[in-house]
């Protein structure tokens, strides 16, 4: 017996009688759902219902069983047999269907388990491992998308793999929780996920990823230096807020130009760099690397030329010639410089991937090319230039720096030092933002050379113990170094301030015994424990590992106290030279002592900024026993 043929015949008979499924069901005492299942071949009526159907449709029972009119009559035994066959066929079909559904549910459940585990571990890893290390999702909404995947997959796991007696209630509860958690997640996403517009771009070979976030309210742009597919860190906020579109243009697979206008309508340029043309360890400068003449001709025979010499950088393009001084250049990474006129970016010069730096001269080897592109918010054409006068070893016509003995000079962001006034060496690092070093923050001597500089809101120490052959860099943190001094190669002292307010400074004195690699606090200042302070103009000077001095001047500059330490800065005692009461009221400004080659200490005690006695002169004292006693020597 064909259940599909039966169902189709019942449907045909019902329509001939102009009955609905509901009307037929009422006549035989069933539901319209049962009639629907018959007509779709999903079930078969009980044998007791066949006579009722035959009576309703005015047909013989055998015709209903055969699924067509005019067929011969069959006995009750055959009817029962055919019904049993039909029921068995329907049951078998139902079992196969249920089995397929079970397999499908199990497959969906297993896939959901895998997705849940992956996304849950991803979110846990982000919250407890990556986020504490300053990583963020490249898009703020990704956090909530991952949350939603976790919610949906968890719900599917309960719906497909968890079996309980009250399955209907389980489904209802699961759906309710899914809806509630989804609504909560969406609300948080609306409130927090759309604060920033995100820009993610890949280089042509997909080797590098650019990630930018723009605050939709303030226009503030954040650039992420370190990206890992879905996550990014080491963010840098642009100094100017963005108004309007942002243009990105990959110049090479590891250099991306970012051009935008700020709220004043001024053009700005930032370049993201991901590669290197040297050994990846030493820092070098693009302006030095490209000294010489570079040239390219367009398809119309027009010449584009870049000349880098002692005058600066000359650009000849489109019939114009512009000279940019080295002070008008800003370097990004070790592969790009941007040329400015009146603080407006004009050109970008990039070292292409075929460039290779000669480590002895820091000049590009022969065969490398550079890219020149004009800065514009519109898409601009790039020019690939080749060097037309490879320099070999003769560089004197292009660049030279003269530095006096035991001194330094900063040029084009490069720090040069000399020990003899003739040979010049470069100090590795980016010193583009350094104009000059304050007294007490640098030293150029054969035994020990060091410089303290600030970069990205942190202080760094770079030092050499072998006359500039090798250099070590140490991060000192978010502090302000007032004075650093080494009494020998290994032992040094540093006065640093963490904060300054109303002439009072909060900080400490640190000591190193390993040449500057590590520093330990030895003195926190004067006052009660936890409230120790210095004064803003405080300075220190040590003459050996133990003997040292510190001044504590008033903000007004009228007076200054002098303190001495004999235990390497662990404790200080206030020091006064013997004076009459009248003189001590006049000569009350103590300077730091000086030490002669024979060990004699010289101390000057002046009158301070309010002193006008005898023309504002000072008293001079000498000590021959390391400041145990002082002798008055005269007035200057």
Image (spheres, rainbow, N blue to C red):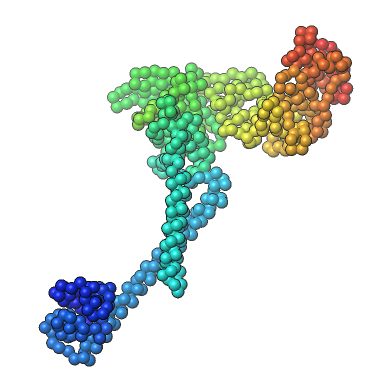
Residue 71 x/y as whole percent: 13, 84
Front residue of 510 and 307: 510
Front residue of 121 and 335: 121
Query: At 70% from the left edge and 33% from the top edge, which residue is drawn?
Result: 507
Quick one: quadrant of the N terminus? Answer: bottom left
Q: Is residue 590 above or below residue 202?
A: above
Query: At 35% from the left edge and 73% from the top edge, which residue is drawn?
Result: 98
Q: How many marks?
A: 0
Residue 471 showing in the rendered view? no
Query: At 13% from the left edge and 87% from the top edge, which residue is drawn?
Result: 72
Residue 308 x/y as whole percent: 46, 22
Residue 252 x/y as whole percent: 41, 36
The answer to whether residue 567 is left or right of residue 382 is right
Residue 548 showing in the rendered view? yes
- The answer to which quarter of the image holds residue 451 is top right
Which residue is the extreme one toward the left? 70
Front residue of 295 and 597: 597
The answer to whether residue 444 is left or right of residue 287 is right
Quick one: quadrant of the C terminus? Answer: top right
Q: Is residue 77 above or below residue 453?
A: below
Q: Is residue 620 above or below residue 387?
A: above
Residue 571 x/y as whole percent: 80, 33
Q: Is residue 112 above or below residue 545?
A: below
């Amino acid at each position: 017996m064909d259940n599909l043929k039966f169902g189709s015949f019942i449907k045909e008979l019902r329509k001939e009688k102009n009955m609905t499924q509901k009307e037929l069901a009422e006549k035989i005492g069933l539901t319209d759902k049962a009639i629907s299942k018959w007509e779709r071949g999903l079930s078969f009526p009980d044998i007791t219902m066949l006579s009722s159907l035959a009576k309703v449709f005015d047909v013989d029972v055998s015709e209903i069983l055969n699924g067509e009119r005019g067929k011969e009559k069959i006995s009750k035994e055959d009817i029962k047999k055919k019904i049993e066959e039909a029921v068995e066929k329907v049951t078998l079909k139902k079992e196969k269907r249920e089995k397929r559904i079970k397999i499908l549910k199990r497959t969906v459940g297993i896939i959901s388990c895998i997705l849940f585990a992956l996304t849950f571990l991803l979110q846990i890893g982000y919250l407890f491992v990556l986020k504490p290390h300053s990583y963020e999702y490249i898009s703020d909404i990704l956090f909530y998308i991952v949350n939603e995947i976790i919610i949906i997959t968890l719900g599917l796991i309960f719906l497909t793999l968890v079996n309980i007696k009250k399955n209907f209630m389980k489904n209802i509860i699961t759906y309710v929780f899914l809806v509630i958690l989804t609504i909560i997640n969406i609300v948080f996403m609306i409130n927090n996920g759309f604060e920033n517009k995100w820009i993610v771009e890949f280089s042509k070979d997909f080797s590098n990823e650019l990630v930018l976030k723009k605050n939709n309210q303030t226009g503030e742009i954040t650039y992420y230096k370190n990206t890992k597919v879905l996550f990014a860190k080491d963010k840098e906020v642009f100094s100017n807020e963005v108004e309007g579109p942002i243009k990105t243009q990959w110049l090479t697979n590891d250099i991306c130009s970012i051009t935008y206008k700020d709220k004043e309508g001024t053009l700005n340029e930032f370049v993201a760099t991901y590669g290197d043309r040297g050994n990846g360890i030493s820092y070098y400068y693009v302006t030095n690397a490209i000294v010489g003449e570079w040239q390219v001709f367009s398809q119309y025979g027009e010449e584009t030329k870049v000349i880098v010499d002692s005058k600066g950088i000359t650009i000849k393009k489109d019939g114009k010639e512009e000279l940019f001084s080295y002070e008008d250049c800003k370097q990004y990474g070790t592969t790009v410089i941007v040329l400015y006129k009146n603080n407006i970016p004009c050109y970008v010069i990039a070292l292409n991937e075929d460039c290779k730096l000669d480590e002895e001269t820091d000049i590009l080897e022969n065969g490398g090319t550079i890219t020149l592109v004009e800065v514009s918010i519109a898409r601009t054409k790039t020019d690939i230039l080749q060097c037309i006068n490879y320099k070999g070893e003769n560089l004197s016509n292009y660049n030279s720096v003269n530095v006096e003995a035991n001194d330094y000079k900063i040029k084009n962001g490069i720090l040069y030092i000399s020990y003899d006034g003739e040979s010049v060496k470069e100090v590795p690092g980016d010193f583009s933002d350094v104009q000059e070093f304050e007294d007490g923050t640098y030293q150029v001597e054969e035994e020990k050379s060091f410089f303290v500089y600030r970069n990205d809101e942190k202080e760094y120490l770079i030092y050499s113990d072998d006359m500039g052959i090798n250099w070590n860099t140490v991060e000192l943190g978010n502090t302000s170094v007032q004075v650093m001094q080494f009494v020998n190669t290994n032992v040094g002292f540093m006065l640093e301030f963490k904060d300054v307010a109303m002439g009072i400074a909060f900080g400490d004195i640190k000591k190193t015994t390993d040449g500057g690699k590590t520093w330990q606090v030895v003195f926190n200042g004067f006052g009660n424990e936890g409230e120790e302070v210095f004064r803003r103009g405080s300075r220190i000077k040590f003459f050996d590992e133990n003997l040292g001095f510190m001044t504590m001047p008033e903000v007004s500059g009228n007076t200054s106290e002098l303190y001495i330490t004999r235990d390497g800065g662990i404790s200080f005692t206030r020091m006064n030279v013997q004076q009459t009461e009248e003189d001590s009221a006049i000569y009350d400004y103590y300077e730091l002592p000086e030490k002669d080659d024979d060990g004699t200490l010289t101390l000057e005690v002046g009158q301070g900024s309010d002193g006008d006695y005898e023309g504002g002169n000072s008293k001079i004292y000498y000590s021959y026993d390391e400041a145990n006693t002082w002798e008055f020597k005269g007035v200057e």
